[in-house]
Image (cartoon, grey):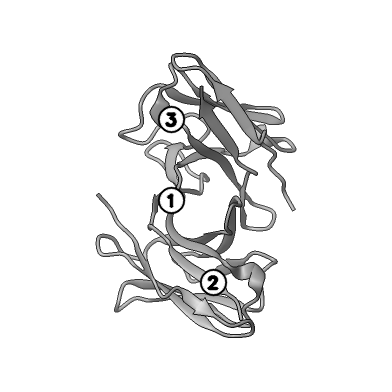
C-alpha cells in the first residue's frame, strides 16, 4: 500500500513560521503532482497548494504570499513552508498525490493517496 | 471562484440507498471525484472521473455527473458507510482544486 507520512506540525504563536514535511517512501515526489489539503477543526476539506512535476506551483487565495510549497528530490520529500501564521490556519494538514490520468483518460486531477495528516495549532 | 454545494446531511436506513448530490455551474463538463472521511481519519478516494472506482472500493459505490449536478450513490447501505463525503473537481480556469462543502451520512 502506497503511503505518505507528514511531520512538522505543532503549536505556534500567531505570526510565527512552521515547515511541514511529507515523505513518500514508495514513489517519486519529483515525478508526481502533489497537493497540500487542510481541515480546520469541525470543518470541511480546503485545498492549500499544488506542485506539478514540472515545478509549477499554485496556491489558494487564503495562503498566497504566506505559504510556499517545494520539494527536495534527493530526499523524496514534499514541504510546505508556512509564514505569518494566523489563528485561522489552525488545521490538520494532509499531503496527497494527484493523478492526472487514469488507465483510460486524462484531465482528471484526483487525489489517490493521502497521508494521515499533521496538526498545526496557531495560538498564543 | 468555482463553488461546489452539497447537502449538510443525509440519513438512510441500513440496506437502503443513499444519494449525495454535488451542485456546481456546468459541473457536467468537469470530472468529479468523491472522498469518504471517517472521524479522525484521512480522506479515502471512493469514486474518480465521475463514475470509476479505485480497487478495493465496493461496487455499492457509484457516481454520475450531468448538467449542474453530480451524484454519489451508495447502494445497500451498511453501518460502516457512516462518514463525511466530499466531492472535488479541478478548476482549469484557476488551476485550483475545489472541494464540496461535505455531506454527513448517517445510517439510522
Q: Chain of mark 3?
A: B
Q: Quadrant of residue A104?
A: top left
Which image quarter is the C terminus of chain A in?
bottom right
Q: Chain of mark 2?
A: A
Percent x, y of residue B37: 47, 43
| B80 up-or-down from A85: above or below | above
Which residue is at a point 56% across and 41% down the rendered structure image?
Answer: B86
Q: Is residue B60 visible?
A: yes
Q: Which mark, residue B81? A: 3
| A100 up-or-down from A78: above or below | above
**Residue at disc 1, secondary structure:** loop
Q: What residue is shown with label 2?
A: A121
**Residue at disc 2, secondary structure:** strand
Q: CA distance from mark 2 to mark 1?
A: 16 Å
Residue B60 horizontal side relative to residue B64, left or right? left
**Residue at disc 3, secondary structure:** helix
Mark 3 and 1 residues: CB-CB less than 8 Å, in contact? no
Q: Nearer the viewer, residue A83 or B93?
A: A83
Q: What residue is shown with label 1?
A: B40
Q: Chain of mark 1?
A: B
Q: CA distance from mark 3 to mark 1?
A: 15 Å
Percent x, y of residue A18: 50, 81
Which residue is at a point 30% across and 77% down the rendered structure image?
Answer: A75
| The furthest residue to the top | B16
Q: CA distance from mark 2 to mark 3?
A: 30 Å
* Badge 3 density bin: few <14, some 14–19, many ≥20, Cα 10 Å: some
| B101 up-or-down from B47: above or below | below
Q: Nearer the viewer, residue A14 or A68?
A: A14
Q: Tally the numbered discs.
A: 3
Percent x, y of residue B14: 45, 17
Which circle's residue, 3 or 1, is located before the other in the chain?
1
For the residues beneath circles 3 and 1, the answer to whether they share a chain is yes
Amino acid at each position: 500500500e502506497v503511503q505518505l507520512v507528514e511531520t512538522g506540525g505543532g503549536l505556534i504563536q500567531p505570526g510565527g513560521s512552521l515547515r511541514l514535511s511529507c515523505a513518500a517512501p514508495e514513489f517519486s515526489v519529483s515525478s508526481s503532482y502533489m497537493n497540500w489539503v487542510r481541515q480546520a477543526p469541525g470543518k470541511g476539506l480546503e485545498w492549500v497548494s499544488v506542485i506539478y512535476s514540472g515545478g509549477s506551483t499554485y496556491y489558494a487565495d487564503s495562503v498566497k504570499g504566506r505559504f510556499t510549497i517545494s520539494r527536495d528530490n534527493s530526499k523524496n520529500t514534499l514541504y510546505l513552508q508556512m509564514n505569518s501564521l494566523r489563528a485561522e490556519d489552525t488545521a490538520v494538514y494532509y499531503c496527497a498525490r494527484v493523478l492526472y490520468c487514469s488507465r483510460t483518460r486524462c484531465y482528471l486531477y484526483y487525489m489517490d493517496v493521502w497521508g494521515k495528516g499533521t496538526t498545526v495549532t496557531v495560538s498564543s | 471562484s468555482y463553488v461546489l454545494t452539497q447537502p449538510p446531511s443525509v440519513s438512510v436506513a441500513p440496506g437502503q440507498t443513499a444519494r449525495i448530490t454535488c451542485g456546481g455551474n456546468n459541473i457536467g463538463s468537469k470530472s468529479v471525484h468523491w472522498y469518504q472521511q471517517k472521524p479522525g481519519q484521512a480522506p479515502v478516494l471512493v469514486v474518480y472521473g465521475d463514475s470509476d472506482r479505485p480497487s478495493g472500493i465496493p461496487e455499492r459505490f457509484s457516481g454520475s455527473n450531468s448538467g449542474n449536478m453530480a451524484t454519489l450513490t451508495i447502494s445497500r447501505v451498511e453501518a460502516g458507510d457512516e462518514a463525511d463525503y466530499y466531492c472535488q473537481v479541478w478548476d482549469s480556469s484557476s488551476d485550483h482544486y475545489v472541494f464540496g462543502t461535505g455531506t454527513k451520512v448517517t445510517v439510522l
